[in-house]
Amino acid sequence: MIAEIGHFALILAFLTAIVQGSLPMIGAHRGNAAWMALARPASVAQLLFIVVAFAALMYGFVVSDFSIKNVADNSNSAMPMLYKVSSTWGSHEGSLVLWVLILALFGAIVAVSGGNLPPSLRTRVLGVQAWIAVGFLSFSLLTSNPFLRLDPAPLDGRSLNPLLQDPGMAYHPPFLYVGYVGFSMAFSFAVAALIEGRVDAAWARWVRPWTLAAWSFLTLGIGMGSWWAYYELGWGGFWFWDPVENSSFMPWLAGTALLHSAIVCEKRNTLKSWTILLAIVTFSLSLLGTFLVRSGVLTSVHAFATDPARGAFILGFLILVIGGSLTLYAIRAPLLKGGGLFAPISREGALVLNNLLLTTACATVFLGTLYPLFLDALGGGKVSVGPPFFNATFGPLMVPVIAIAAIGPLLPWKRADLAGAIGRLKLALVVALAVSFLAWYLTTGSVPSWAPIGMGLAAWLFIGSLVEFAERIKLFRMSALKSWNRARHLPRSAYGMTMAHCGVALVLAGIIGSQAWQVETIRVMAPGDSVEMAGYEFAFRGVRQLKGPNYNIDRGEFVVTRGGVPVTRLFPEKRFYTVQKTLTTEAAIHTTWIADLYVAIDESRAAAGEGDGSWSIRIYYNPLVPWIWLGAVIMMLGGLVSLSDRRLRVGAPRRAKSRAPEIPSPQPA
Amino acid sequence: MKLKRKHRRLVFVVAGMTSLLIAAGLVLNAFEDNLVFFYSPSDLAEKTVPEGRRFRLGGLVEEGSVKRLADGLTVEFIVTDLVATVPVTYRGPLPDLFREGQGVVTEGKMDAGGLFVADNVLAKHDENYMPPEVAEALRAAGQWQGETDPQ
């Protein structure tokens, strides 16, 4: 019964979205206030219906109602409650409901709190949101109904994919989706502005918080995904340039560019059509990511089903959204006149360069990800594009991005003095050179030449960001008290930027450190054996059999010492999930925050006739790896701090009455 | 810097073109070296792959073919598409779902003696999973009757 209520609520949400997407839009076109007013209650109603649907589905998982096909396919009565709950979005069908839930939530926030938006803009934003919801809801209802019943109901469910039964995976999709769907707000604002035919600084101010929020959550979502890959896949790596990873990374790159161009749009009232285009591209990439992941075109843990109907549906939707919005852009963008002028060497110039490089980098990732699909579709054979390709293309493009990220904030708007800015970065330059030299000097073995340079670059950005912040509060040039006062009155967005840029520097250092200086040992160890590595001694104490809630455990024990002093004990596991008959690896990690000690057990040698309890073991020493996630978290916090900026919180000022006549009003036709 | 509006725009156009050109150069250069083709054992029986070229080999792990060498880390097995076979040697950790009779994709190079030296055996995530390349290779070899991809 509950499931039928959920299904019915989903249908009602679909119908509400159709109403919300049509009548108010017509009202906005004709200037009919009553019809426009419909958009706000409609989006709240839509949210309520989807909340009911989502709650009904989650209820089915919580009480293990295996008469619901989705529950039977993805849950099991022996699973811990956390994973029963997270199975709600662990399946393809459920993840779609989560997607529309977040979409409706954002729409309702605009409806409720968007009182200072001009009514026509708000109505159109909600209208565009409604059409996205119509697309996803019809996809859900027509091809992926989460409430399908099974008759007869099985006694127990088939369980969630064991790899996903992990805290990291339980929270990763919601964060990722908040990111993806957040960009839909930027998209809706962009399309609404194109329909209205006007974009100004106030518009950018409405778009920025959504972009910031989306970007922050996407950063966290990607970080969690890579953290999960790091400890769950047991390979010591954290990023594989896997198409699924790339499909979340591309919207992130475009979104980062959007974040920066929206600043120019807001502060200088220029780069308008470019910002609109980026908003469209960013959301299109989010949709493309969904398409790649959900349609089964790609093969990975994320590809839930290879149902051709679904693939065709998403592809059609994708063409409609991207084609439609780009067509609208082509027609309307020329109406958006450019704003203020600026010299190439200026804050705007640096941000434009940042945009150019980020979008180019995004394009190379796009090419590498989709080339195998195109080639296969054209009958050119099956190929794969691996990490070497991305390292060779994406890596070099990031070098100028990082270099400029330290300089740009020191440049004033409009026109700047490059030599002066670099002069103020003397300290950063000295530290960067010192770090490069130290990295090269302290390395005993062979190391790729880019590694010391990269470490220097990370130091350059980190110190450069701090220098910029110190300059703002005139640290050491005034009394400490005065500096403190200045610091207190700095806008939060200034803190946010410094944090985010420092976070990028940490991530960069972590990536380079782990790639260049990782130490790896693979060997067979019997209980009592020990191995020395990177100054640590790992003593193997053997493997014990234990039982988890829905899996059996082989748990190894390692005692780690350094110069005879105990450091830690590590317990890597091999888990055998009894329902799906699947093995998973749980690496054991000890972090010193400078490096990770990483141990995984592979397989017992008993099968090979060695009955002494020996196992094949992998031990990694991963320098600086923890900084990757530390940096990602700092980046996200930077985004949130910036989001809490008073100017954004209070809301954008009303549009200036005396707007330039350069922007034509929407034609009534 | 005093530049006319037209010239300023030109600076950005040039910067944009430059960054695209650099990217295109990087991409072409990287494609040259890093495109990894997929072959089935039957493909390899028909055509020769340049020695030293990395590629992916996929098929089924032949039943009873998996041998572990005395060092405990090197594994030898045979990849088959039920028409042709290729022997493979691999040193390192096997994915959790590596099993005899199951689909597998390996990446590496062919040595002079016709032995495929893999440095990567791809981790697959589901016991019932069949890599689509493998499914297609089996279908091409006439060994797969299924209408859809085996799942």
Image: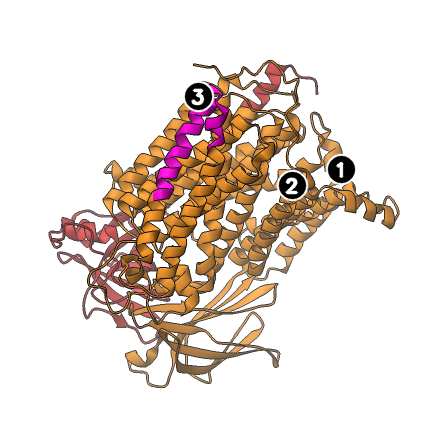
Chain colours: A orange, B red
Spatial CA span between label 3 and label 1: 43 Å
The label number, if any, that marks residue B84 in the structure image = none
Magenta stretch holds residue A160: no
Spatial CA span between label 1 and label 2: 36 Å
Look at mark 3 in the image and give the residue it sits on.
Answer: A330
- In primary-sequence order, the first of circles 3 and 1 is 3
Look at mark 2 in the image and give the residue it sits on.
Answer: A649
Q: Secondary structure at mark 3?
A: helix
Query: Which three-letter amino acid code belongs to the residue tagged 2?
Result: Arg
Q: Pick whichever, B141 or A26, lies toward us.
A: A26
Spatial CA span between label 3 and label 2: 33 Å
Look at mark 1 in the image and give the residue it sits on.
Answer: A423
Query: Which three-letter amino acid code belongs to the residue tagged 1?
Result: Gly
Whole-percent x, y for residue A645 in the image? 67, 42
> Bounds of the magenta span?
A12-38
Residue A336 lies in what quarter of the image?
top right
Q: Pick whichever, A425 or A131, lies toward us.
A: A131
